[in-house]
Image (tube, rainbow, N blue to C red):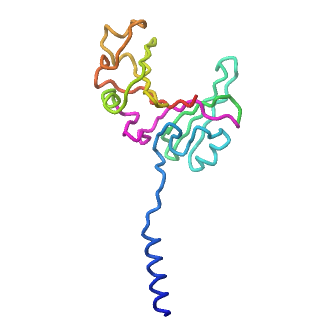
Amino acid sequence: MLKKYAIALTLITLFVGCQTEKKENPFLITNQSVGVLTDSTEVKDLERLFFNDSIVRYVGGDEFTGNINDIEIYETSGNLLMVLTPFEALDSTSTIKTIRIADPRFKTSEGLNKNSIIKDIIAKHKISNVQNTLSNLIVSLEKSNVYFIIDKKELPPEMRYDMNLKIDPIQIPDQAKIKHFMVSWY
């Protein structure tokens, strides 16, 4: 009888030990999260979430910054991971409004990262809007909080200077690089 219990206990131990625990990808970007950050993360939680990393807060006077209080997150090696902009400057209970992704390890489930090109974006997503600004294009994805900023220097010369020009995604050269990879939670 003792042998049966020993065998059963051994089998249970092996079964539990062999199961792989599903770990969250610390670099996955979804509509509600960017790695360990979520759309409900408060500024005061950053120290706990990035305990091994460096957090740099720029605190400027309102007269010049327009009340913007960006927070930069650096790895211990010194590499910039992301730049966070909270909804409310200098408010520790504020949640994050926008995130500029700086590290190419952060990826969407489709594999898009800051080193992707417009061809990759068009192949994997439906683009809802291309906003033509003075020096950039803002490419928004349908049903997503992710958007990309592309420098107009990536466009043919005849398309760079007319802000009233309606630009279709297929007019953007396939090899156009992403200037900024952004996530917005507002």
From the top left corner, tell me how far across and down residue 164 is, in percent.
42, 6
- In this picture, is 76 found above or below 72? below
Say whether residue 130 is magenta: no
Residue at position x 41%, y 26% in the image: 179
Residue at position x 33%, y 16% in the image: 155
Residue at position x 65%, y 39% in the image: 42
Say whether residue 100 is magenta: yes
* Quadrant including the C terminus: top right
Looking at the rendering, the stretch of residues picked out in magenta corresponds to: 93-116
Magenta stretch, main secondary structure, is loop
From the top left corner, tell me how far across and down residue 73 is, in percent.
55, 39
Residue at position x 47%, y 77% in the image: 12
- In this picture, is 165 found above or below 123? above
- In this picture, is 23 found above or below 167? below
**Foreground pick, 61 / 35:** 35
Q: Image check: 173 left or right of 67? A: left
